[in-house]
Image: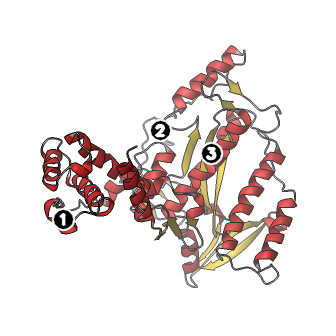
Amino acid sequence: MTPLRAKYIRDLAIRGRAARTQQSYTSYVADLARHYQRSPDQISYEEVADWLHHLIQERHQSASSVNIAVNAVRFLYGVTLGRDVQGLLASVPRMKRNTRRAEVYARSELEAILTAPQQPRDRAFLMAVYAGGLRLSEATHLKTTDLDRPRMQWRVREGKGGKERVLPLSARLLAELETYWRAQSLLEFGRNRLGGDLGLSLVLHTWGQQLYFHPHLHGIVTGGALSANGQHWRAPKQRKFLFPVRALAALFRGKFLHRLRQLLNAKALRLPAALPTTSSAQRQWLSLLYAKRWVVYAKVPFGGPQQVLSYLANSTHRVALSNRRITAVDEQAGRVSFTYRDYRKGGVVQTLTLSAREFIRRFSLHLLPAGLVRIRHYGILANNRRERDIAKARAIFERRGRPAADLPTLRPLEPLLCPHCGRAGLRLVGWIDPYGLRHIWRLGRLIFDSS
């Protein structure tokens, strides 16, 4: 490295230029030296202008790229070499950029763009970039600790000029990121424990028994992992559960308390009076929580494909409240009554009565935004891997002499028969509800209560 180059990089670092800026500026100055086969301190302003013209006419560089080159040589001659600034600005002007009217997409077009990626990672990355107007370098530095869920904000680090900023966090983006990160944590646990990729199918539910907002995931996980080369199926040593419950308990304890510590440090929690408020007392309190043994219940593995389908059928197409749980609708008083299970009292069924306004408010909490997918698949069950990796797993089982169980065969729907003449070909055109109202099926699919 020449002394001039070393001094140039030093001056850039002293003035706080980012690493990518240093790299770009140094690259353009080196290109200028190669163009004339001389050291930059021996090149005149007129020659610099000819070199910029060469970038535009011969290399067809854009105005943004040319202006980066202008900034690089201005810094070289004005700061590192200490030349005349006025003459430099007159001889090396910035290139005028042609401004274009921004294209405004319709909402349906944006939904199609944001939901186009098949990989959950790519979809979450694209949504984060769009929602925050992020640069590539800003998006790659985004971490889970940058999300402030209580305030619905997120912090963008490593911005242009080393600046940070705080942006509003939408519920749609938060759900996308949390679903992805939760799945990735379990996939990482599988790679560390089994040395391969698990398969996950997760279903997002957002409700509790009383219709409060209670986001949680129902999911199934494969009973083993497929190795990276696709040649081995690695099952856990024990057969009763996928991972040791103590290891899972330690993982959940660490993740939960780490997030709790972040919220305490950010003063984002309203603590009861009985809990410690000073920093030293909170640290001691957290140490006691880390020392406790946490309990994790590992559900018994499924017995076969039929049990898997039964579990998924109860989770995938369920809504917040089924019709059979609604016991009374008082139109005059404007009240709705429905049943719920009180799990604090052993699952006793009780009745809750709400005003119509409050009932609608609670139910509306669980209407997902358009384009948000409730059912996600990860690992070897991901959309872009399922067909390939499941075939590899089946081949491994067959080589071991344990053919994979086939899924239950799907029987075609029997044609509807007329109850009067007994002939086939009956076509459903509508239905009559319990109140005697007639509903005609005109557009779209007929949607029945699926809970």
Left or right of 360 on screen, residue 131: left
Front residue (pair 321, 293)? 293
Residue of label 3 = 313
Q: Which class describes the residues within 10 Å of circle 3: few (<14), some (14-19), or many (20+)?
A: few
In front: mark 1 or mark 3?
A: 1
Precedes in sequence: disc 3 or disc 2: 3
Q: Which residue is mark 1?
A: 89
Relative to the observer, which residue lies in front, 261 or 75?
75
Q: Amino acid at mark 1?
A: Leu
Quadrant placement of the N terminus: top left
Q: Residue at x 54, y 59 (%)?
A: 175
Question: Which of labels 2 and 1 is toward the front?
Answer: 1
Q: Earlier in the sequence, mark 1 or mark 3?
A: 1
Relative vertical location of residue 431 with respect to residue 267 in this rendering, above or below = above
Q: Is residue 160 left or right of residue 77?
A: right
Disc 3 and disc 2: Cα gap in Å? 35 Å
Real-space Cα distance between discs 1 and 3? 70 Å
Foreground: 85 or 352? 85
* Residue 394 image point, x, y percent: 63, 22
Would you call the spot at circle 1 few (<14 residues within 10 Å), some (14-19), or many (20 or more)? some
Give the residue at mark 2: 421
Q: Is residue 171 visible?
A: yes
